[in-house]
Image (cartoon, rainbow, N blue to C red):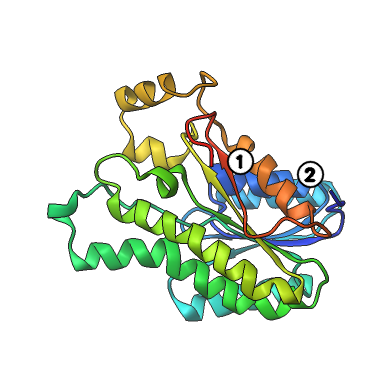
Amino acid sequence: MGTLNNKNAFITGTSQGIGAAISETLIKAGCNVCMHYFSSGEEPKRLQKIAVTHQQKAICVQGDLTKEEDVIRCVKEGVDFLGSFDILINNSGSLVKRNTIGDITTEYWKTVIDINLTTMMLITKELLPYLIQNEGASIVNVSSLAGRMGGHAGSLVYSTCKGAVLTWTRSLSKELGARGIRVNAVAPGFIDGTRFHETHTSKEAALKTIASIPLGRAGNSYDVARAVAFLASEYDGFITGETIDINGGVYSA
């Protein structure tokens, strides 16, 4: 595993939870960071101050990554500030709301796909020329246990998207391998303290889920961030097209 000192990372969806923990972990490992957010900038701006105390560069960029013009602007702001990038973390995503098959409208279908897949495609495409500039660049995509096993009732479209993230990861790793860019994914299970579960999971359902985890506890955002940092820092390595499952033993490939 290599050092992350002075590597430049672009992280999407850093307002809270997993994205914020990934940003903090990469900062403390020595990265300069561009932290994207859509809604609240409070957490990335707090992390920006932490980066400054570590004598590292950090910028916060706001945008709706389902819109190509916002993607272009966010990448330009990041490139103008850092020059180029070694690492891309595709973390943005949302279930939006629970809908079973009978309640799925085409508008809802397109919205969930745009938030979870179109964002990833657009930011990867736009950032790729700057990743190619650096030997051993790394892309890490955040999927979900739902993409492996299917999710709970009402998460059909979200689960479908997260399964597609895994296929995207495998396919892109083959496409970019010749350019020296590794592409991997992480698939978190039940991660406590995230907006996802605070919004979409009842306390009763959470307790039932935690009781089924072999390790006997929920995961936390830093469990995911450590795995992401490993995949990012293995920039001279031989791991690509893979998914690390972070679920306490519920699923293993």
SS state under label 1? helix
How much space separates mark 1 and mark 2, taking CA atoms?
15 Å
State which tag comes first along the sequence, 1 or 2: 2
Q: Is residue 215 above or below residue 77?
A: above
Percent coordinates x, y for residue 141 in the rendering: 57, 57
State the residue in front, 30 or 43: 30
SS state under label 2? helix
Q: Residues within 10 Å of mark 1 (few under 14, many from 20)?
A: many
In the image: residue 211, left or right of residue 132: left
Q: Residue at x 38, y 67 (%)?
A: 114
In the image: residue 146, left or right of residue 13: left
Give the numbered dot on residue 224.
Answer: 1
Q: Residue at x 58, y 37 (%)?
A: 221
Label 1 is placed on what type of residue?
A: Val
Residue 85 figure quarter: bottom right
Reading the image, the residue beneath label 2 is: 28
